[in-house]
Image: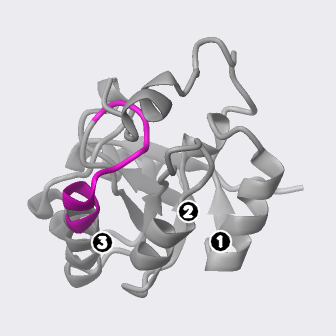
Amino acid sequence: MAVDLEVCVDTIDGVAAAQAGGAARVELCAALSEGGLTPSLGLMREAARFDVPCYAMIRPRAGLFCYSQAEVAVMIADVEAARDAGLAGVVIGAQDATGALDAEVLGWLMDVGLPATLHRVIDVVPDWRAAIDLAVEVGIERVLTSGGCDRGACELRCCRARGRGVL
């Protein structure tokens, strides 16, 4: 059975190495040390020149995945920038104040019209099965996961306490 390799990179040299190494897809990020943030428009444009499909991480800041209205507006603009740069898709995720996937925000991000992957937000939702169902419902085509995590380390206290995920 063949397995597709998806490689996370945060430099243009990383895109070149991923392509040379036979990656099926690239997850294009900034700040991998922070878990991956939205890459610059310049990096998106240059990555789109490669043959390997590149998906831009859409994440405006480090921390958990509950976003303010202003942050959601930035994310929508970033998805539009990825589309306009010629990227193959985006990597997205958002939670509501309960910790579940935020269907409304994901719907808005999907409305831009790019194929999407759900990022590792799946590892911190209270019900991953419901999250998978919602991801399919909104049109997300694949899910990235660590396969689960230590729930103590992934506690959603910030989302619950403040209604958003700033750490």
Q: Which residue is farthest right?
A: 1
Q: Decide: marks 2, 1 in contact (CB < 8 A)?
A: yes
Numbered disc 2: secondary structure: strand
Residue at the (83%, 52%) spot, across then down? 129
Q: Is residue 165 above or below residue 133?
A: above
Residue at the (29%, 43%) spot, across then down? 37
Assess whether residue 78 is covered by the magenta stretch. no
Q: Residues within 10 Å of mark 1 (few under 14, many from 20)?
A: few
Residue 159's quadrant in the figure? top left
- Residue type at mark 3: give it: Val
Numbered disc 3: secondary structure: helix
Cα distance, mark 2 to mark 1? Answer: 6 Å
Residue at the (68%, 56%) spot, across then down? 4
Q: Residue 30 in the image: state x and y as whole percent.
A: 24, 42
Q: Is residue 96 above or below residue 117?
A: above
Numbered disc 1: secondary structure: loop
Q: Decide: marks 3, 2 in contact (CB < 8 A)?
A: no
Checking the image for residue 117, the label placed there is: 2
- Residue type at mark 2: give it: Thr
Circle 3 residue: 79
Magenta-tinted stretch: 62-73
Who comes first in sequence, dot 1 or dot 3? Answer: 3
Quarter of the image containing the N terminus?
A: bottom right
Circle 1 residue: 141
Q: Residue 52 in the image: state x and y as whole percent.
A: 44, 67
In terms of depth relative to the viewer, which is nearer, 90 or 45?
Answer: 90
Residue 23's quadrant in the figure? bottom right
Q: Is residue 72 above or below residue 144?
A: below
